[in-house]
Amino acid sequence: MEEYFNGHTASTEWEWNSAGKTLVSATTGIAQQENLLNINKKVSDYLGAGWTNMPLEKENLITVRNLLTMTSGINSDKQLVTHDNLTYVADAGTRWAYSNVFQLLMDVDANASNSDFETYFNEKLKNKIGMEGFWNFGIIYKIYHSNTRSMARFGLLALNKGKWKDEQIINENYFNESISSSQNINPSYGYLWWLNGKSSYMVPGTQDVFQGALIPNAPSDMYAALGASDQKIYVIPSKKMVIIRMGDSAYPNNPTFASSGFDNKLWAKINTVIN
């Protein structure tokens, strides 16, 4: 099924917002399978010592995997990723907090591949699956833009655990890690992917822990790329299904990062069709 509304068409370019984090996760996995980096090594191996405004012994605790899982321990209150803002809050691995610090993975990938991030991303991922689109490297946010079908192509790659036709673009073991609980603090988070069907979840902007599944109406095996103003990639292996939602916020007076009440309402509608 494919449908567009309010002037949005198959060729309209739109921002993925934080749904694009999953593109960074995938690119990092590709760099690892090419032996350019190891996600278990410390970030300073790729960015050099002093990349944070933290005591060196605390900075050295932060691995690439911590950036993938939002567990760097860096202050998450300031979204502008500058050296002065990268201050210590907790030891790496002991605190989950959603923030823009993940953007430093782009620098890790670029330095490890001896290329700029977009060039490496285009060669290793975008061009291989026939996506269109571009990165907007803004001062605060680094956001991917594409048409809806390109977003769907990435969704299909995710459904097939990183395989496109006969080529394994993303190592399957790494991809399976990325859609599994990456830590116990927020089991509903993998490597920049959101996971449904877990016992509890956290959301951006708070340290509160909520009991139950992230999106109760959605299938428990669903994993998702979730962006601000309701940009969505839902992947449901048990249904062999990918659902894309792109466009203006469902709640323009109260747009949210990542998950929103729209997810559960939409899945109530979808369930009447697929069940």
Image (cartoon, helix red, strand yellow):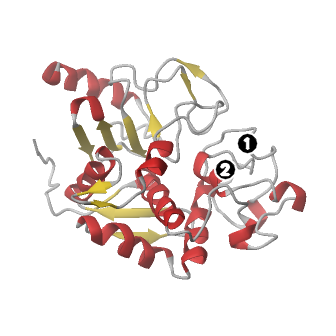
SS class, disc 2: helix
In the image, residue 32 sits, relative to residue 172, either above or below, namely: below
Name the side, left or right, on which 256 lies relative to 12: right
Name the side, left or right, on which 152 lies relative to 105: left
Q: Which residue is mark 1?
A: 93
Q: Is residue 218 visible?
A: yes
Residue 173 % position (x, y): 46, 48
Q: Residue at x 40, y 58 (%)?
A: 170
Location of residue 251 (image quadrant): top left
Q: Which mark is residue 166?
A: none
Q: Is residue 55 visible?
A: no
Closest to the observer, 218 or 159:
159
Amino acid at the residue labelled 1 = Gly
Is the residue under label 1 in contact with that under label 2 (CB below 8 Å)? Answer: yes
Residue 91 % position (x, y): 81, 45
Residue at the extreme bottom:
114
Q: Earlier in the sequence, mark 2 or mark 1?
A: 2
Q: Which residue is mark 2?
A: 66
